[in-house]
Image: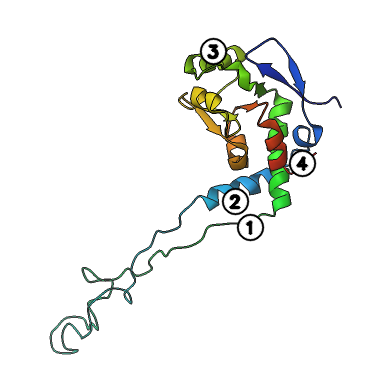
Amino acid sequence: MAAPKAPLLGGTKKEVSLDETVFAAEVKPHLVHEAVRAELNAARQGTRAAKSRGLVAGGRSKPWRQKGTGRARAGTIRAPQFTGGGVAFPPTSRDFSIKVNKKAMRAALRAALSDHAQAGTLGLVAGDSFEAPSTKQAVELLGKWGQQTPTLVVVSEDEETLIKSFRNLERVLVTVPAELEVAQVVWARSLVVSEAALPLVHVKAGVTS
């Protein structure tokens, strides 16, 4: 199997060879699914809650006597049938997080990256191709490439020129390797990685060499 390659955008037509351990990994859909599910669950706050009858204030004594009133017996106005009473089966705050091993998360990231490499939806961009922040130049670069959106752009933290050029584009998400998630890679229809960020993506995917 030939080594995966990605086009270098914004300049002469050139293809760059990619690391096979990161961009030619076996794609395991079930592993990617578990990773995406874990990341999305980790983003949920889980703070939705309501008060049960034991948490509502008031209602220390019976609202009326047990017999002789013609009404149903009641022990407290904190019961669910009263206005201002507690909720019968209230939702409580909970933790939605799912544990996924670090090795599995890294393998899922390699699989998602490899899927883009195999589909030809992965492109590289040189940091020096933008002399100054230019949204217009970023639009032209993506337009000439011709891939579908949404697009995920991964750049290093110190590449402010690229960040400012791409961050205002519609259906384009800019992130750094340290914050790269499997869900973002799966969500994107096309992926752009800067040459400076490429080694950091390798580290994020668990490949240091």
User: Which residue lies under the disc numbered 2?
Assistant: 38
Task: List x then y, in percent, for residue 150.
Answer: 54, 27
**Amino acid type, residue under disc 4 in the picture:** Val
Q: Amino acid at mark 3?
A: Glu
Say which amino acid is labelled 2.
Ala
Badge 4 marks a residue whose secondary structure is loop
Foreground residue among 167 and 113: 167
Quick one: label 1, few (<14), some, or many (20+) residues within 10 Å?
Answer: few
Q: Which residue is mark 3?
A: 140
Foreground pick, 164 / 84: 164
In the picture of the structure, the residue carrying the numbered disc 4 is: 207
In contact (CB < 8 Å): disc 3 and disc 1: no
Which of marks 1 and 2 precedes in the sequence?
2
Q: What secondary structure is found at the residue carrying circle 1?
A: loop
| Looking at the image, residue 141 lies above or below residue 91 | above
Figure quadrant of residue 85: bottom left
Looking at the rendered image, the quarter that the N terminus falls into is top right
